[in-house]
Image: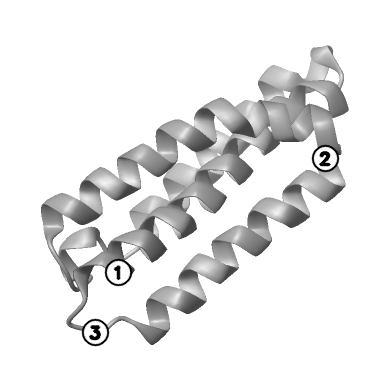
């Protein structure tokens, strides 16, 4: 489901989503090194869940501001989690296996994308 199916202004929701992603890109690594992988991932997943739950409750709301805020919060959590996984992956997996694991992950992602409706 894309942003066009979420209530509110498409332009405002897109701007909110992109601002949240840029912020998450910058803060994901900082959170990883300050909190560690476990606490950092728990925090950003909590942020993502809070944004998603808030979005569920205001989905049919006429107030576009709340919708764009919750879209941004959910996107921040998801983007920060992805970046933290990507960064911590290099520390957890030995270098000799990194390319193989990335290849398997890329193949699995493409297969799942092909099978999606």
User: Hey, which quadrant is residue 37 in on the image?
Assistant: top right
- The quadrant the C terminus occupies is bottom left
**Residue at 58% over, 41% down:** 80
Residue that label 2 marks: 37
User: Residue 86: x percent and y percent?
Assistant: 65, 30
Front residue of this view, candidates 102 and 76: 76
User: Residue 36: x percent and y percent?
Assistant: 86, 37
Q: How many marks?
A: 3
Label placed on residue 57: none
Comparing labels 2 and 1, the label whose residue is closer to the camera: 1
**Residue at 16% over, 69% down:** 8
The secondary element bearing badge 3 is classed as: loop
In the figure, 25 relative to 4: above or below? above
As measured in the structure, the alpha-carbon distance from the residue carrying label 1 to the one carrying label 3 is 8 Å
Q: In this view, does 46 lie to the left or right of 38?
A: left
CB within 8 Å, label 3 to label 2: no
**Residue at 47% over, 57% down:** 73
**How many residues crowd mark 3 within 10 Å: few (<14), some (14–19), many (20+)?**
some
User: Residue 46: x percent and y percent?
Assistant: 67, 63
Residue that label 3 marks: 61
The secondary element bearing badge 2 is classed as: helix
In the figure, 73 relative to 20: above or below? below
CB within 8 Å, label 1 to label 3: yes
Labels 3 and 2: the sequence-earlier one: 2
What is the residue that sits farthest to the top in this orientation? 96
Front residue of this view, candidates 11 and 92: 11
Residue that label 1 marks: 67
Front residue of this view, candidates 21 and 115: 21
User: Residue 24: x percent and y percent?
Assistant: 52, 37
As measured in the structure, the alpha-carbon distance from the residue carrying label 2 to the one carrying label 1 is 30 Å
């Amino acid at each position: 489901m894309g942003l066009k199916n979420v209530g509110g202004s498409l332009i405002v929701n897109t701007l909110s989503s992109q601002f949240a992603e840029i912020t998450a890109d910058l803060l994901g690594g900082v959170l990883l090194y300050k909190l560690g992988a476990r606490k950092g991932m728990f925090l950003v997943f909590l942020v993502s869940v809070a944004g998603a739950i808030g979005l569920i409750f205001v989905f049919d709301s006429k107030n576009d501001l709340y919708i764009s805020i919750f879209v941004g919060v959910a996107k921040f959590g998801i983007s920060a989690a992805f970046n933290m996984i990507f960064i911590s992956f290099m520390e957890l997996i030995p270098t000799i296996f990194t390319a193989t694991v990335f290849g398997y992950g890329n193949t699995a992602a493409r297969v799942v994308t092909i099978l999606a409706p």
